[in-house]
Image: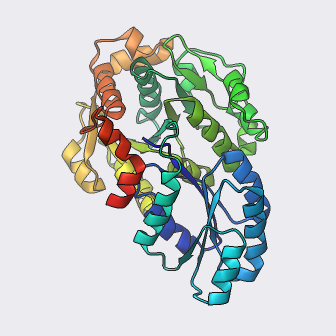
């Protein structure tokens, strides 16, 4: 399969952003790595994030934006620039194309036209190496077991995948991924985000800590005040490099829907939403889904995980929760408090501490489904279809 196609959106109209986001994220293999509204950040972000396509909204003042477009096109000839505008003025379109723009998209954008433009980009990348897959794990509320799932899922994928797996702790203040694995990292996510201009794989590798189970760990900052200095742009630079180095990235979080979360979720292949059968948790999950839906995110990438099923759930069932949230249940993790709490307290993953526990076996099944999704085969013709085929089928 061709590697993912990475997009930057330069735009100051949130309504247009949501519409474009919804169109792009319907296609598997499309990743939005940054959404910008500051001209000074555009060239820096293109360099840092190694993108393929930049979509620029020219409205409402095309003449003010076109010099920026021309500068970006001249500096990054290997990056395709798409311009979007409500204007159908011939001289403006001609001037825009002469500035180095690859495609002029008239708003409202026709999905077929956009798909065809993307397909042209995909053709030139059909033989390149695939990037890794980013899987985010989001808790419907605190204490639902998202960190437990993220950590143990990374361990299970590391035992399945032939290439590297890294788990990243996105709870910048109170994350516990390192604690659950009983490691004390020398470097953290804050060290990488503090120097976004040096994101070569060799630098990122030095910040990762190898666990005996075979996975790598990128921990949250050691000091709480370091969390305030974390920026979405810097974190995206880290993820962009990690996805070139790993088969899977498991992100514990994001823990709140802010700008940083939007960037991560746009880049993500799968979002695992973890809930327990409790009314407050389900209500929080509804708020999360409403926020994603209004932001134009593709909820087909969001999978429902019901955790600790089997306890007294005050008359809520898995079916009740799935119907309320409008999601199919991707997996159910049974309650096994003794095995899980002991694993957490001694800092050992379930694979090594309780390999036959019900929880560990459920997480193993999730890992296997993510590693080889239903219907996927090793047929070479199916693999060749890749992103291009999915675009034309959209």
Residue 329 visible, this angle: yes
Q: How many marks?
A: 0
Q: Quadrant of the N terminus?
A: top left
- Residue under the image location 41 percent in, 32 percent down: 145
Q: Nearer the viewer, residue 118 or 231?
A: 118
Residue drawn 55% across and 47% down?
264
Colouring mode (rainbow / by chain / secondary structure / one colour): rainbow
Q: Nearer the viewer, residue 355 or 26?
A: 26
| Placement of the C terminus among the 4 image quadrants | bottom left
Residue 256 picture location, percent across and down: 55, 49
**Does residue 391 appear to the left or right of 185 in the view shown?**
left
Q: Quadrant of residue 336?
A: top left
Image coordinates of residue 285 in percent, x first then y, are 39, 51
Q: Between residues 100 and 240, which one lies in front from this camera angle?
A: 100
In the rendered image, is residue 283 in sight? Answer: no
262 sits to left or right of 67:
left
Residue 85 position in % (x across, y down): 59, 80
Judge whether 312 appears above or below 273 on screen. Answer: above
Could you tell me residue 298's position as x and y percent? 41, 57
Q: Residue at x 64, y 31 (%)?
A: 220
Q: Residue at x 32, y 27 (%)?
A: 368
């Amino acid at each position: 399969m061709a590697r993912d196609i990475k997009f930057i959106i330069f735009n100051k109209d949130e309504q247009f952003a949501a519409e474009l986001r919804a169109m792009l994220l319907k296609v598997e293999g499309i990743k939005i790595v940054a959404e910008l509204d500051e001209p000074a950040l555009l060239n820096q972000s293109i360099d840092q994030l190694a993108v393929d396509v930049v979509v620029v909204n020219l409205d409402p003042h095309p003449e003010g934006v076109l010099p920026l477009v021309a500068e970006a096109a001249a500096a990054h000839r290997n990056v395709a620039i798409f311009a979007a505008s409500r204007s159908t003025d011939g001289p403006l379109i001609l001037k825009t194309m002469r500035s180095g723009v690859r495609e002029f998209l008239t708003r409202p954008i026709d999905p077929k036209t956009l798909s065809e433009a993307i397909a042209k980009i995909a053709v030139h990348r059909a033989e390149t190496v695939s990037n890794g897959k980013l899987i985010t794990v989001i808790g419907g509320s605190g204490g639902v077991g998202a960190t437990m799932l993220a950590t143990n899922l990374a361990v299970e994928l590391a035992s399945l995948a032939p290439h590297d797996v890294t788990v990243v702790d996105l709870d910048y203040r109170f994350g516990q991924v390192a604690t659950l694995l009983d490691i004390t990292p020398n470097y953290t996510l804050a060290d990488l985000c503090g120097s976004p201009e040096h994101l070569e794989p060799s630098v990122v590798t030095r910040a990762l800590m190898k666990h005996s189970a075979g996975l790598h760990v990128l921990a949250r900052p050691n000091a709480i005040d370091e969390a305030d200095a974390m920026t979405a742009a810097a974190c995206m630079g880290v993820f962009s490099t990690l996805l070139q180095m790993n088969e899977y990235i498991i992100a514990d979080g994001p823990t709140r829907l802010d700008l940083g979360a939007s960037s991560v979720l746009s880049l993500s292949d799968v979002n695992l939403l973890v809930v327990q059968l409790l009314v407050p948790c389900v209500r929080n999950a509804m708020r999360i889904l409403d926020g994603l839906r209004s932001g134009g995110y593709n909820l087909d990438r969001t999978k429902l995980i019901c955790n600790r099923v089997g306890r007294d759930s005050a008359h809520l069932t898995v079916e009740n929760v799935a119907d309320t949230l409008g999601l199919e249940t991707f997996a159910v993790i049974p309650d096994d408090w003794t095995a899980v709490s002991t694993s957490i307290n001694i800092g050992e993953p379930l694979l090594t501490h309780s390999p036959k526990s019900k929880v560990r076996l459920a997480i193993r099944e999730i890992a296997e489904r993510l590693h080889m999704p239903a219907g996927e085969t090793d047929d070479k013709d199916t693999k060749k279809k890749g992103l291009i085929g999915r675009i034309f089928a959209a």
